[in-house]
Image: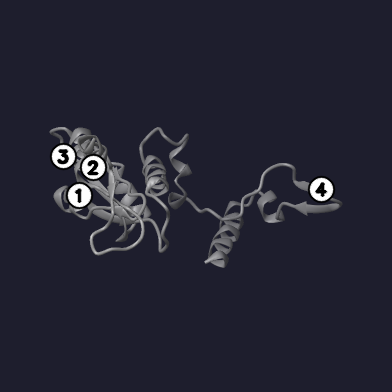
Amino acid sequence: MGGKSKRVQDDRVDRRPYGGGPGMVLRPEPLLRAVEKALGKRKGEVIFFSTDGKQFDEAYAQRLSKKKDIVLICGHYEGVDERVAKIHKARKVSIGPYVLTGGELPAAIVADAVARFIPGVLGKSESLERSRVSSPEVYTRPEVLEWKGRKYRVPKVLLSGHHAEIDTWKMGRTKKKS
């Protein structure tokens, strides 16, 4: 009976952290095997999501879009054994100054941000916001929206057809939000 109990314990993917503390830490062996299996003999970019990592930004997303192979290591619980990042020489990345319950959302954010820079993913290359004058405020039809007895209009400048004035308005809106 004792042998069966030990086998169940060896199949666990998480363990209590050394040094104490709440939660569980993902064991290194399953993740090391998964990364090796994902990459095979290829060299790829290995990203390890960590609160002390370099802040993920658009420039890094653009660089990643040129990579052929990317592996995203997503922790859960208290995180991933630090040796996984060291062994795979993973780049530590943070998506923001906050903590989430797992790495799934950061991975989705990175995948989406990177995908935008892959040719053909967006309908038009002009859709990359940084390459055009954009505004956090956008409008579409109808010109006058009636909602619960009130009228909400599209700003007149957007209806003018005067592109220089529209660009000036958009730039002003962008600065206002900063």
Distance between mark 4 and mark 2 Cα atoms: 55 Å
Name the side, left or right, on which 124 lies relative to 72: right
Disc 4 is placed on an element classified as strand
The kind of residue tagged 4 is Glu
Marks 1, 4: nearer the viewer: 1
In this view, 121 is above or below 112: above
Q: In the rendered structure, which amino acid carries the disc numbered 3?
A: Lys
- Judging by the rendered image, the residue that carries numbered circle 3 is 43
Q: Is residue 66 left or right of residue 171?
A: left
Name the residue beneath numbered marker 2.
Answer: 31
**Mark with earlier residue (3, 1):** 3
Which residue lies at the image location 14% right of the left edge and 49% below the top edge? 87
Question: Secondary structure under badge 1?
Answer: helix
- The residue under label 1 is 84
- What kind of residue is marked 2? Leu
Q: Mark 4 highlights which residue? A: 146
Dot 3 surroundings within 10 Å: few (below 14), some, or many (20 or more)?
few
Q: Residue at x 38, y 56 (%)?
A: 95
> Pointer 1 and pointer 2: residues touching (CB < 8 Å)?
yes
Residue 31, picture quadrant = top left
In terms of depth relative to the viewer, which is nearer, 22 or 126? 22
Q: What residue is at 26 percent from the left and 55 percent from the top?
A: 92
